[in-house]
């Protein structure tokens, strides 16, 4: 059974099995530490107690997020990862994302939650759409570090990202106005102040 706990700096040493997976985006250590310092309520892990190691918990997944934007006050999910052997057990949707939603809605009282996902990541797109997220816009060249993207660029599912949103009760779907996969923008347009 999964337990939910705050993510601690020492947990970084126990997430290699998750981060070595080719489907998981990797970040430098300062990325994780910055979130732990500035947004501790939005960084947590799911753990499992193994029958052959009852005194040691095994990290099965984690979620890293933050609250941002003064005009469009919302939560942002920066990373979500689940250990390969625990996928398809609904840890991401029933444990990590549900808890993140409750903290965002009832404690921070944000209008919506957003995240970015590669356009060609069909499994992630299905997961998010099945729990209520919608595509707000396509961010051209979001995952391309080699050149400056342009709105004239063709769609590239491997380099572009969908900005997906989950509207919460106080938003009343206002943040989804004029949204959809045909709404294109550049990475510089997704910075919230």
Image (cartoon, grey):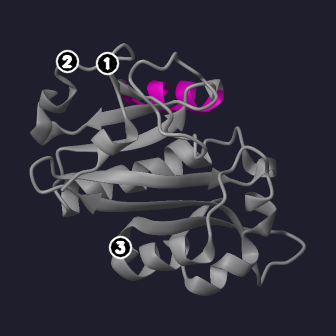
Q: Quadrant of residue 69?
A: bottom left
Q: Is residue 150 left or right of residue 16?
A: left
- Report the mark closest to the observer, 2 or 1: 1
Q: Closer to the N terminus: mark 3 or mark 1?
A: 3
Q: Is residue 26 left or right of residue 179?
A: right
Callout 2 touching callout 1 (CB < 8 Å): yes
- Residue 168 lies, in percent from the top left, at 21, 39
Prevalent SS, magenta region: helix
At 41% from the left and 60% from the top, the residue drawn is 65
At 31% from the left and 18% from the top, the residue drawn is 183
Does the segment drawn in magenta span residue 106? Answer: no
At 17% from the left and 32% from the top, the residue drawn is 175
Pointer 3 local density, CA inside 10 Å: few below 14, some 14–19, many at least 20: some
Question: Looking at the image, which residue sits at the far right?
Answer: 52
Q: Closer to the N terminus: mark 2 or mark 3?
A: 3
Q: Which mark is residue 47?
A: none
Q: Which residue is mark 3?
A: 39
Does the segment drawn in magenta span residue 128? Answer: yes
| Quarter of the figure that contains the N terminus | bottom right
Q: Which residue is mark 2?
A: 178
| Quarter of the figure that contains the C terminus | bottom left
Q: Which residues are magenta?
A: 123-134
Q: Which residue is mark 1?
A: 183
Query: How much space separates mark 2 and mark 3, taking CA atoms?
Result: 30 Å
Say what secondary structure mark 1 lies in: loop
At 72% from the left and 69% from the top, the residue drawn is 15
Q: Closer to the N terminus: mark 2 or mark 1?
A: 2
- Report the mark closest to the observer, 2 or 3: 2
């Amino acid at each position: 059974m999964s337990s939910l706990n705050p993510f601690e700096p020492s947990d970084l040493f126990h997430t290699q099995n998750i981060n070595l997976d080719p489907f998981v985006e990797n970040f430098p250590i300062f990325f994780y530490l910055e979130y732990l310092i500035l947004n501790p309520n939005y960084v947590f892990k799911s753990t499992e107690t193994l029958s052959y190691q009852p005194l040691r918990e095994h990290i099965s997944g984690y979620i890293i997020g933050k609250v941002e934007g003064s005009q469009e006050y919302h939560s942002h999910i920066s990373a979500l990862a689940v250990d390969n052997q625990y996928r398809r057990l609904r840890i991401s949707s029933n444990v990590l994302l549900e808890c993140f939603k409750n903290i965002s809605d009832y404690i921070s009282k944000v209008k919506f939650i957003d995240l970015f996902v590669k356009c060609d990541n069909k499994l992630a797109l299905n997961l998010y759409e099945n729990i209520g997220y919608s595509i707000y816009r396509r961010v051209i060249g979001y995952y391309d570090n080699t050149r400056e993207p342009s709105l004239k660029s063709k769609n590239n599912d491997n380099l572009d990202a969908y900005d997906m949103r989950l509207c919460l009760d106080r938003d009343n779907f206002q943040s989804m106005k004029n949204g959809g996969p045909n709404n294109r923008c550049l990475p510089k347009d997704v910075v919230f102040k």
